[in-house]
Amino acid sequence: MEDLDYDKCRHTSKHWKTMLLLAYQSLGVVYGDLGISPLYVYKSTFADDIKHSDTNVEIFGVLSFVFWTLTILPLFKYVFIVLRAHDNGEGGTFALYSLICRHVNVSLLPNRQAVDETLSNYKLESRPDKKNVSRVKMYLEKHKFLHTALLILVLLGTCMVIGDGLLTPAISVFSAVSGLELYMSGPHHEHAVVPITCFIIVCLFVLQHYGTHRVGFLFAPIVLVWLLCIGALGIYNIIHWNPQVYKALSPYYMFKFLKKTRKRGWMSLGGILLCITGSEAMFADLGHFSYAAIQIAFTSLVYPALILAYMGQAAFLSCHHPRGDHISFYVFVPEKVRLPVLILAILASVVGSQAIISGTFSIINQSLAVMTVMLVTTCLTSLVIMLCWHKPPIIAVIFLLFFGSIELLYFSASLTKFQEGAWLPILLAFILMTIMFVWHYATIKKYEFDIHNKVSLEWLLALGPSLGITRVPGIGLVFTDLTSGIPANFSRFVTNIPAFHRITVFVCVKSVPVPYVFPAERYLVGRVGPTANRTYRCIVRYGYRDVHQDIDSFENELVGRLSSFICYDWSRAYNTNSFIEDDESTSDCRLTVIGTTGFSAPPEFELDGSEQLQSVSCGFPTVESITDIIEMEPVGSRVRFSDHESETDTRPDEQMREELEDLLAGQRAGIAFIMGHSHLRAKQGSSFMKRLAVDFGYSFLKNNCRGVDVALRVPPASLLEVGMVYIV
């Protein structure tokens, strides 16, 4: 008993050490942007729209807005609610979309299968019998335009992040280095800023090669010291200038601020909004850390340090009333420590990829992007609350209205700067969203064409010497998007070259709405036709966070999975005292999940009295370790039961050995990759927008994007491309 208690305490201690280590690392990756917001919030807020007064209504009103904005959005919304809406530990806009698609049939992925729901990461909570939830679910599934609208919403939020990310590194690092003007003369400053900025940006991109955790270890000390520094400066300013500043945390001062400043105060909310820049990173970077680690770091260090920093700045401004253009973070810093704080601020700004972004320019280039992403996250999270967490719809509506109204208030304030330059990130986001949507639309049309033009199984089985078709040595991997049926590009290939490989495998590499697929669940393998035909189907499943294999490991692993399937299929037929007649066409319906295996030599089998596959020299799994899945009802297959005591022409183990030897011989002869080279054309009578998207947009993107052969690094000598024109 004492040993059990000791092991439990040891495990708990190790768990907390890991959690604290992740929380420490998250400082350097997640909280860079958010942590340096005190550098520019007050300067941006008081830039043009509002001025100081002796009553300090403006200062206290801004502090009250900052406090409640930080409390409601990053703390309440993200830390306590949104971070719980993760997808198996992954966060971000697409993670929410993936989570929704698994609970409601709104996915636009073309080759979705029911078998995908058996994945370990395909977690679904129990579905309570609630009429309101069912009605919403049925309404979403029934109206196809809502599926497209949801996808556009997700693309909008993602593209706004990318559009802002294209501008932020260059502008923010440039602004951070510009802080050197306090200690350099004008001419020297002008000639030094650009080279230093370029050098820092290059170094930042080089560091990304080392991975998130190493970058976190490198940057975390800087952010940690910075947060402790601004917290200490805040306490100093509060005690030294105005200990009563805590009264401004009351929401009453927000109403006084808006009542006095009116429209000017509403327009200044774009500057206040900058206090939460980087909040979305807590959710987007969730996959690198954990919910508990990010929560610990924010609640125990980041949030208190930021509040103290803003209170200290407000305490200083309440006793001093400088003009808006003279407000700088460094005026709050005692002169004796100003230089080391400046150096630390530049380092922290580099970590956060943004820094002392002056006045209006900071509002123009970030508020819109920040609020758009937050609004999208709010909308998607409200759907998760109702459809995935199965909470009453009223709770989802309250969440949407409460947080959405606050975000819309800030969003409307940011729009006032649209003509002054806020159009740039919106334009970039629109271009990116158009590219993504055109690609998706054309991909769907191409898949529909493949579905309507696929070839029947009977056509494949009819191919033989009587038609002048020969089977050549080797393994032919025919890549297709179809999960069933014979693709049209294969029929075109056989029509033009009356030969195909002795071992033919139809390979479908598909994405599933989960972040990761375990290697043991990645491969679905089945037969196409009778065993003598030596034709198989292999569906390779990847999550949206998985890294695709290179060609060498893919070849070896695919052959290993095929060999395991052959062993399993024959042992299954032997154990059930049945086999499928070779002279009859089998249905293309049975798929088997094949786990991790190795294949290096012809296996040795032993079938004992219990009819159990006991051992295989190349590491084949037992029958119980492999899952057999029926994807659709069998059509046209006949099963004949046999008596094992009676004599058969060929023993099952000998047939299995023969099939494995054929597979090994095919691997030795060489593997060929047969891929379609598609050309999409809009059919006659199509609208101008469709012809523009398909004939020009998609064609341009496809010609300038890496193909599957490049992604897999297929050797040119092993590649066979089949050209096809798709009229969609």
Image (spheres, rainbow, N blue to C red):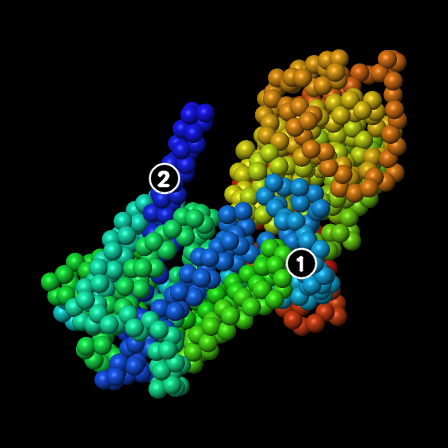
Q: How many marks?
A: 2
The residue to which callout 1 is attached is 106
Which residue type does callout 1 highlight? Answer: Val
**Disc on the earlier residue, 2 or 1:** 2
How far across and down, in percent of the image, does residue 505 sit? 70, 36
The residue to which callout 2 is attached is 17
Which corner quadrant of the image does residue 214 belong to?
top left
Local secondary structure at mark 1? loop
How far across and down, in percent of the image, does residue 315 sit? 23, 72
Q: Residue at x 84, y 28 (%)?
A: 580
Is the N terminus in the top left, top right, bottom left or bottom right quadrant? top left
Local secondary structure at mark 2? helix
Count neighbours of disc 2 (C-alpha within 10 A) and say few if under 14, some if 14 to 19, many if 20 or more.
few
In the image, 523: left or right of 470? left
Is the C terminus in the top left, top right, bottom left or bottom right quadrant? bottom right
- Report the mark closest to the observer, 2 or 1: 2
Front residue (pair 82, 669):
82
In the image, 24: left or right of 538? left
Q: CA distance from mark 2 to mark 1?
A: 41 Å
Q: Residue at x 75, y 70 (%)?
A: 685
Front residue (pair 264, 446):
264
How far across and down, in percent of the image, does residue 231 sit? 25, 60
Vertical order, 459 against 52 (above or below): above
> Visible in this render: residue 52?
yes
Q: Going by the picture, which residue comes out furthest to the front?
A: 1
Vertical order, 696 against 716 (above or below): below
Which residue type does callout 2 highlight? Answer: Lys
Q: Going by the picture, which residue comes out furthest to the left?
A: 336
Count neighbours of disc 1 (C-alpha within 10 A) and say few if under 14, some if 14 to 19, many if 20 or more.
many
Q: Residue at x 87, y 21 (%)?
A: 642
Q: Residue at x 46, y 59 (%)?
A: 78
Which corner quadrant of the image does residue 268 belong to?
bottom left
